[in-house]
Image: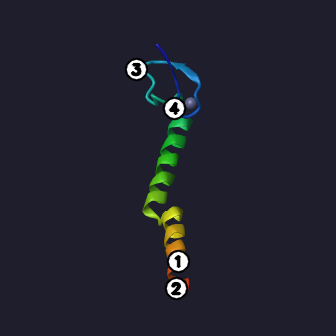
């Protein structure tokens, strides 16, 4: 059974002896975990989109009314 490594997309043969599966190697496993960590960090931080939205709202509120 062959499948693609989620990190590098390399075709690898399924093996129960591969302790890094579903990754092809320890390197790919660590890269994936690193991306997970950075995604979590982004979620914890203030999302840029939300900041822009509130800035827009502030701008709108500052506009003089006709
Ligand atoms: Zn890989």
Mark 4 or mark 3: which comes first in sequence? 4
For discs 2 and 1, the disc positioned in front in the rendered view: 2
Question: Seen from this angle, which residue lies furthest front?
Answer: 66
Mark 3 to mark 1 CA distance (whole Å): 59 Å
- Sort mark 3 into few (<14), some (14-19) or many (20+) by Cα contacts within 10 Å: few
Query: Which residue matches tag 4?
Result: 6
Considering depth in this image, is 51 or 29 the residue closer to the camera?
51
**Residue 4 image point, x, y percent:** 53, 24
Mark 2 C-beta closer than 8 Å to ligand 1 = no
Along the horizontal axis of the image, is 59 left or right of 14? right
For discs 3 and 1, the disc positioned in front in the rendered view: 1
Query: Which residue matches tag 1?
Result: 60
**Residue 46 image point, x, y percent:** 47, 66
For discs 4 and 3, the disc positioned in front in the rendered view: 4
Quick one: SS at disc 4? loop
Query: Which residue matches tag 3?
Result: 16
**Residue 52 image point, x, y percent:** 54, 68
On screen, residue 35 above or below 57: above
Quick one: SS at disc 3? loop
Q: Residue at point 44% right, 18% down? A: 15
Mark 2 or mark 1: which comes first in sequence? 1
Mark 4 C-beta closer than 8 Å to ligand 1 = yes
Quick one: SS at disc 1? helix
Mark 2 or mark 4: which comes first in sequence? 4
State which quadrant residue 27 falls in: top right
Mark 3 C-beta closer than 8 Å to ligand 1 = no
Query: Which residue matches tag 2?
Result: 65
- Sort mark 1 into few (<14), some (14-19) or many (20+) by Cα contacts within 10 Å: few
For discs 3 and 2, the disc positioned in front in the rendered view: 2
């Amino acid at each position: 059974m062959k499948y693609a490594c989620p990190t590098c997309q390399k075709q690898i043969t399924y093996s129960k002896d591969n302790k890094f599966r579903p990754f092809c190697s320890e390197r790919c496993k660590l890269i994936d975990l690193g991306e997970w960590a950075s995604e979590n960090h982004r979620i914890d931080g203030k999302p840029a989109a939300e900041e822009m939205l509130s800035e827009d709202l502030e701008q709108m509120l500052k506009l003089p009314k006709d």
